[in-house]
């Protein structure tokens, strides 16, 4: 079995359903390029399987995904660029939005950064009450990556998106439900997600589900794509900055960051997205 097969587990736990488990428990399922490639490949496999009508996504070891792997972030800081292997992934970062079958996220443990973005790209989200959520980017000196702005606005509204992006605060599953970031709270989110997926598979027409999903996603797809590409265009400058090095150091050293004041050349021009 290859490394990329190892980082996800693909099962068919209930009739009509498929389950993708992010499987890097030794790193708490932290996001890497191989994980993204394998995850999108699993989504493609389940999309092509006529016996699968609904998809569940979860994480191994009691946590969903705490964001990008800090080892990868250290390499990005050292090299001032992202992993060039990203260019070999055929699907765009917003690929989950285009899957024509309902995708349900079962969330527990930690869900942060790119992990939160991936959960928001799912159609429905079920969380444990004690899950810890954060956008994280502002505390790492990063732009709102992975389309996080419109993804949060789609789920919970512009005001909530501003709150969670600007403060980068940590909030639990109960507040996530109150804000609209998730759809349900459950003490057993995976079991609830599997039950819901099986219900959809047994009672809803796949053609209707695909059409409904396309209509729901259509007003947001361009916004997510544009936001993702705009943030990505600035990444090499950001990853080579002193601010990012301080943001990463504070994470690794478990201390508050000490960022300098905003300089004139750091202010985005009005025409920039």
Image (cartoon, grey):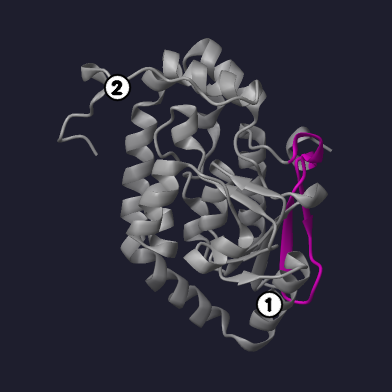
Query: Quick one: quadrant of the C terminus?
Result: top left
x and y, in percent, of residue 171 in the image? 57, 52
Q: Nearer the viewer, residue 164 or 219?
A: 164
x and y, in percent, of residue 272 in the image? 21, 34
Tell me: 214 left or right of 9.
left
**Residue that carries the numbered disc 1 in the rendered image:** 196
Name the mark nearer the viewer: 2 or 1.
Answer: 2
Mark 2 residue crowding within 10 angstroms, few (<14) / some (14–19) / many (20+): few
Magenta span: 6-28
Tell me: 31 left or right of 210.
right
Mark 1 residue crowding within 10 angstroms, few (<14) / some (14–19) / many (20+): some
Precedes in sequence: disc 2 or disc 1: 1
**Residue that carries the numbered disc 2 in the rendered image:** 262
Asked whether 208 falls inside the magenta stretch, the response is no
Query: Quick one: quadrant of the N terminus?
Result: top right
Tell me: 163 left or right of 109.
left
């Amino acid at each position: 079995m290859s490394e990329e097969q190892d980082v996800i587990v693909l099962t068919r736990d209930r009739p009509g359903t498929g389950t993708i488990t992010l499987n890097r428990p030794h790193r708490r399922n932290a996001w890497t390029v191989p994980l993204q490639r394998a995850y999108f490949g699993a989504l493609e496999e389940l999309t092509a399987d006529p016996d699968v009508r609904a998809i569940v996504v979860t994480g191994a070891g009691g946590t969903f995904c705490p964001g990008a792997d800090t080892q990868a972030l250290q390499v990005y800081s050292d090299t001032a660029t992202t992993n060039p292997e990203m260019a070999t992934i055929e699907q765009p970062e917003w690929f989950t939005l285009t899957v024509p079958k309902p995708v349900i996220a079962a969330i527990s443990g930690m869900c942060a950064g790119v992990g939160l973005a991936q959960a928001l790209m799912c159609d429905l989200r079920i969380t444990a009450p004690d899950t810890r959520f954060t956008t994280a980017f502002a505390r790492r000196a990063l732009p709102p990556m992975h389309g996080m702005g419109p993804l949060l606005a789609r789920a919970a509204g512009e005001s909530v998106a501003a709150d969670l992006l600007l403060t980068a605060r940590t909030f639990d599953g109960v507040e996530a439900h109150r804000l609209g970031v998730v759809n349900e709270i459950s003490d057993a989110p995976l079991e609830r997600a599997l039950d819901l997926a099986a219900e959809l598979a047994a009672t809803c027409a796949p053609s209707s589900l695909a059409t409904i999903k396309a209509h729901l996603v259509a007003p947001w797809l361009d916004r997510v794509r544009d936001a993702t590409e705009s943030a990505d265009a600035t990444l090499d400058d950001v990853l080579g900055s002193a601010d990012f090095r301080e943001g990463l150091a504070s994470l690794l050293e478990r201390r508050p960051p000490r960022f300098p004041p905003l300089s004139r050349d750091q202010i985005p021009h009005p025409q920039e997205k």
